[in-house]
Amino acid sequence: MTAAPAPLHRALGLTDEELARVVEILGRQPNELELALYGVMWSEHCSYKSSRVHLQRLPTAGERVLVGPGENAGVVDAGDGIAVAIRIESHNHPSAVEPHQGAATGVGGILRDIFTMGARPLAVADALFFGPPDDARQRWLIDGVVSGISSYGNSVGVPTVGGELTFDPCYAGNPLVNVLCLGALRADRLVLGRASGRGNLAVLLGSATGRDGIGGVSVLASAGLSGRADGAKRPNVQVGDPFEEKRLIEACLALLDAGLVVGIQDLGGAGLACATSETAARGGVGMDVDVAAVPRREPQMAPWEVMTSESQERMLAIVTPDAWPAVEALCGRWEVQASMIGTVTDDARRPGRLRVHDGDRILGDVPAASLAQDAPRYERPMRPPADLERARADDPSASEPLGDCGAELRALLVDPSWVYRQYDHQLFLNTVVGPGGDAALLRLAGPGLPPSERGVAVTTDSAPRWCAIDPRAGVALVLAESVANLACVGASPVAVVNCLNFGNPEHPEVVWQLSETVDGLAEACRVWGLPVVGGNVSLYNETDGVDIPPTPVLGVLGLVERLVDRPPEPVLAAGASVVLLGARRAPGAVAHPLAGSRWALECRDRRRGVLPPLDPEAHARVSGFVAALVAETIGGGGRLLDGVHDVSGGGLGVALAEMAVAGGTGVVVSGIDGHAELFTELPSRILAATSHPAALCARAAAAGVPAAVIGRAGGDRILVEGRAGMLVDLSMTELAESWAGSLAGSLERA
Amino acid sequence: MSARIGVVVFPGTNCEHDTVAGLERAGAAATLVWHREDRLDGFDAVVLPGGFAHGDYLRPGAIARFSPVMAAVARFAAAGGPVLGICNGFQVLTEAGLLPGALVKNRGLRFVCAPARVRVESARSALTSGLEPGTELSIPVNHFSGSYVCDVATLAELRSAGRVVLRYVENPNGSVDDIAGVASPEGNVVGLMPHPERASDALVGSSDGLPLLRALVGAAAGVPAA
């Protein structure tokens, strides 16, 4: 390395105190290679050094949990001898700098986390956040991210079954790309990423190692962005090869099927440094690694570059020497390169060392666990924003006057199909409900799995507009929405994964947001009995010192006992009664709170106030009632609901409009308490369409769920009559144009 | 005995399991065949399924056509055996010269995964025999390079000989003459961009692909075992 003006450790992202800590661990000054290892492994991205003290407050235990946080993915028992692996991760900064490859490699990385556990990746869902698409740079970002997910996910052969899309000027400089993947495996075949057995071989599978992505975790993921200068970070973004990944998936699953590996770990952030130190540390052993044995993509690579490169599509397998010929043969069949690059050691005098060799020369010698587990943990200072009380008082619920509700409703309609039409969402013939529904609903089937009639559902949800107002209450509302989404496809929630996207943790308000979010999520998970089985934290999401709003993205896994028929869709059919399930009014002075609603934000530019209250028990009753009704239908029983849709972003107005557009019918609704009831995002409400309103209301009453017939589908207009006059009177043609045109219209513009 | 159908797997193929499932629903016994095999003995029909053979690098199908199995596919087709190429399989068949024309990038230059309505135009093929021309089916498309092109003389020949077997009702990709599927002069080799196996179970959206797969299974059963 050439001499840098700053001391080397700082250029590698380590503070002076962290360097002192390394010196203490080693009992000497580290050399350049060792410093590079600590630089990447102690980065925020790899070590969670600012978030770990908070994350430990999340509940992680549950009777279905087979593997909780800390491994490559969470694993849940789904019944019938099938386990489901699930994980969510961010690829924010790479996508901001190079949207196509950044998003593509985000997909590749999350898939490896899943098949590392022995599970075949079966579905992907993406939560994407951009600035509004009326700007050319945003359109470049959106197009790049969507095409990156499309080209990688479609080609590697994993369907993208869901996700969500948020536009807010807050993300213009720092878009967010979160990718969730779920896979399934035979429950008896679970593998963990740990090394064991002195003399066992460390085998590198997959791509050759190049200079792409060096410092991705430290330079990119653990520092803020600053507008134009970020183009210079483009070489820190990895480049994806879905074809290599596809062969790697098949080869690794075949190796696991044949029982040829004792441990396996993917290479993601921090590359070989991370995979070797983590597998050794988890197994309580040491490892000798020879960089000279690592196949290179380019000449003249320095050993530290080989150890920290984030070249994609690589896995590290631990195999016994006896198994090596069979491993080599099987990899050859799939045309996957396999190289012996190291051995597991168990030296009684110096246990647990990661030794890096270049042929005969020893270049570095550090305790493996010190890289993987001994990063400093920071309890960074935190404080609530100074204007918290003033912000609560600035509430739009009562102060915003009635406007043109029809025009506002039109402005809130967004058809996301421009995005998901570019994703293969059908592969494996499991997708019963794909993107565009409340939650994705899949058959629980795949090559090598025992036959089952069970189904699995998954949803990704977020609402930064809520979390910005009150991170603690906001994240609970997000989880509530996920539970309601799952209910609409007949599923009961069983586990949560989270991707916590926040700003700069050196800002005390950001740490307060993180802490409040963790507490809010922990409380909500406890009350509904949901374990958090995995997560990811993405910090330093800031542009020129301005932090993004707190953006926890939740992925919630649901299960269905029997899936043999299609669920009701979020549609209205002409003639059906429209029934609103759940309490129509919030308790207390404000019956229809508007703070945090899409209406307040997008129609009135109001970002403050007091969020609607959440009654966890009432929410569980409504969701449980709907889940049970839909479960009856998909299990081959009765069909009381013709259509169902949860009321969330945009409130009752948007839910009605979406169902009407999807059903191609008009609707007449009356008795609505003004614009506030039309647009409030008061939780725990689900909209249903039924030909048997009396039966539905009777069953709701028996379940303790409020139900009100609010209208009837039919005609060619959407008419919403308020108590004080007509609120909305639009032709379905106008409505459908607004729905279909909003996104496609701006994105197909040059 | 049910028809035995070989489903060819190239590195990067990803619809092989779905295709096996669809064929089994249509009554066949289907087996995967690795691309390095150079014999197709014992099969009554061969299917090249969808996916991204060799990553679609260079051009979809351009590398796959050199796989050892393709010489066997050509011999199988020359002997009159039914050969079906679905999506990427169709692209491979055109690259291999077993079907005329080519598949180029979609109009709009974007990947499209969506249900498509297609109309049966000719019953003179292994995929459509027994179906009533004019029948409309809902079958998903899932491709980036699905726009069918060919020269004027070929198009005239395809049209006059009834070799255009399926047309889109609403063209999703800019294919010439709305062509969704074509057949060889004898009708035993057929390629189409829509995925009939993805429409083989109403639970996942449609079972309109089953009549096509059943026609193929019927054609296979009519071929004496090799």
Image: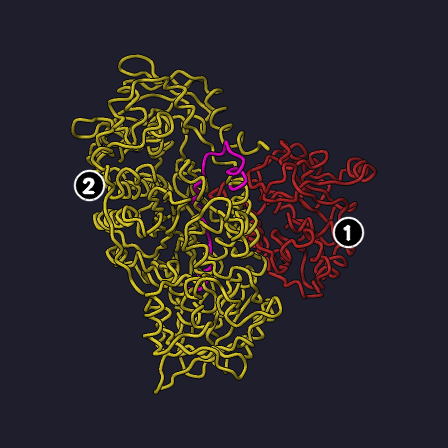
Whether the magenta-drawn stretch holds residue A137 is answered as: yes
Q: Residue A475: give x, y in percent of width and height.
A: 28, 43
Q: Which stretch is magenta?
A: A115-141
Task: Provide the chain ID for the residue under circle 1.
Answer: B
Q: Residue A116: give x, y in percent of width and height.
A: 44, 64
**Chain identifier for the red-coloured part of the image:** B
Question: At 44% across and 79% down in the image, what residue appears?
Answer: A355
What is the spatial separation of the Cα atoms under label 1 and label 2, in whole angstroms? 65 Å
- Given residues B28 and B18, the one toward you in this image is B18
Q: Which quadrant is home to the C terminus of chain A?
A: top right
**Chain identifier for the yellow-coloured part of the image:** A
**Badge 1 amino acid:** Gly
Q: How is the image coloured?
A: by chain
Please state if A466 lies on the left or on the right of B224 as rendered: left
Q: Say few, some or many: other residues with alpha carbon within 10 Å of mark 2 (under 14 / 14 to 19 / 20 or more).
A: few
What's the mark number on residue A617?
2
Task: Provide the chain ID for the residue under circle 2.
Answer: A
Please state if B75 lies on the left or on the right of A216 as rendered: right
Residue at the front extreme?
A5
Whether the magenta-drawn stretch holds residue A500 is answered as: no
**Badge 2 amino acid:** Glu
What's the mark number on residue B97?
1
Residue at the right extreme?
B153
